[in-house]
Image (cartoon, rainbow, N blue to C red):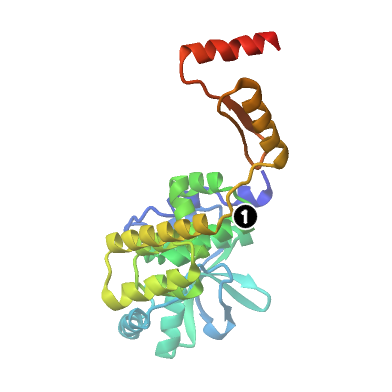
């Protein structure tokens, strides 16, 4: 197992365990994080660089504004967490608090300093975000894909670490195959994950986008989308069958078929497929005809 795999630790086991009592400090302690120092007073916001491993790519403006108003009245109750980075700091967790603080106009923010590896940065960012405020389905999908790519995990290993069935992991990863417009719609809660899964089953991207727009415009249920998808796929399969050229028996097999008919004086068939497999069928309509054919075989 590579060093990257080992670095993931037990923190990911809590990835989707939505326990409301787990504090950020407890989450960090569940990882193998070495403390460089305790709580420091405040650090300049201008010195903080965003976490490149942050799985959340979309922040609701209303929620940020509410948090900003709370900070304006009560201040920062829970410090953010950072690590020293070049001539400043790299954010580990607390991006919503950092963004809200900027909205209020703060220039400094209370923070913990930690010493942590890049692999644990990714893990901690995932845990912190999912524990505190659920990521949307697309952000979870991207996070799972990053763990597979950047931490060299198989789906089986990822399933074990996050405590989710492999089928659940697969379903999330399949969402990334949808067109960008549909992924954005799922991110923005215009459609549900069940809607998205139904759209995945539609082969044509053009049809996927058309049904996606119908879901939004006509408020289609998941069941309705499933029925539409099934109908479209059946139509596509029927069209494929019509355009598929039927297999034609090679000339040598046709000649052999005629020879067998002449030899046994009865209907005979030579069957073959594209792989070269086949069979020879000699028909008989009575026991007497079977005995006659069998006698010819013995004489041959």
Question: Which quadrant would the C terminus be assigned to in this image?
Answer: top right
In the displayed orientation, state which residue is furthest to the bottom.
Answer: 105
Of residues 262 and 282, the one nearer the viewer is 262
Residue at x-position 27% and y-position 65%: 221
Q: Is residue 69 above or below residue 86?
A: below
Q: Is residue 23 visible?
A: no
Of residues 294 and 147, the one nearer the viewer is 294
Give the image location of residue 31, x and y in percent. Answer: 52, 53
Say how many tags the image has. Answer: 1
Give the image location of residue 7, x and y in percent. Answer: 61, 51
In the displayed orientation, state which residue is furthest to the right.
Answer: 252
Q: Can residue 20 be seen in this view?
A: yes
Crowd around label 1: few <14 · some 14–19 · many ≥20 (10 Å): many
Residue at x-position 58% and y-position 78%: 49
Question: In which image quadrant can residue 90 be found?
Answer: bottom right
Q: Is residue 104 above or below residue 193?
A: below
Give the image location of residue 16, x and y in percent. Answer: 40, 54
Give the image location of residue 278, x and y in percent. Answer: 63, 32
**What residue sits right under mark 1 in the picture?**
151
């Amino acid at each position: 197992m590579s060093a990257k795999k080992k670095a993931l630790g037990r923190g990911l086991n809590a990835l989707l365990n939505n326990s409301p009592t787990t504090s950020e400090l407890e989450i960090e302690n569940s990882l193998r994080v070495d403390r460089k120092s305790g709580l420091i007073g405040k650090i300049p916001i201008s010195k903080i660089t965003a976490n490149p491993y942050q799985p959340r790519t979309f922040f609701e403006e209303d929620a940020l504004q509410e948090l900003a108003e709370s900070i304006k009245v009560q201040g920062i109750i829970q410090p953010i967490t950072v690590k020293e980075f070049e001539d400043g700091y790299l954010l580990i967790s607390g991006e919503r608090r950092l963004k809200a603080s900027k909205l209020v106009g703060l220039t400094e923010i209370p923070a913990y300093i930690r010493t942590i590896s890049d692999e644990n940065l990714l893990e901690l960012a995932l845990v912190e975000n999912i524990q505190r405020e659920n990521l949307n389905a697309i952000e979870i999908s991207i996070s799972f894909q990053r763990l597979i790519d950047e931490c060299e995990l198989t789906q089986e290993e990822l399933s074990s670490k996050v405590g989710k069935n492999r089928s659940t992991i697969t379903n999330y990863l399949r969402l990334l195959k949808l067109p960008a417009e549909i992924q954005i719609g799922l991110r923005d809660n215009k459609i549900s994950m069940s809607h998205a899964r139904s759209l995945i089953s539609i082969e044509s991207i053009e049809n996927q986008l058309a049904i996606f727009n119908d879901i939004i415009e006509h408020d289609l249920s998941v069941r309705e989308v499933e029925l539409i998808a099934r109908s479209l796929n059946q139509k596509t399969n029927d069209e494929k069958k019509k355009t598929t050229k039927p297999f034609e028996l090679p000339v040598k097999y046709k000649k052999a078929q005629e020879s067998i008919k002449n030899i046994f004086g009865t209907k005979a068939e030579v069957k073959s497929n594209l792989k070269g497999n086949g069979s020879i069928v000699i028909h008989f309509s009575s026991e007497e005809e079977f005995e006659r054919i069998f006698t010819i075989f013995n004489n041959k």
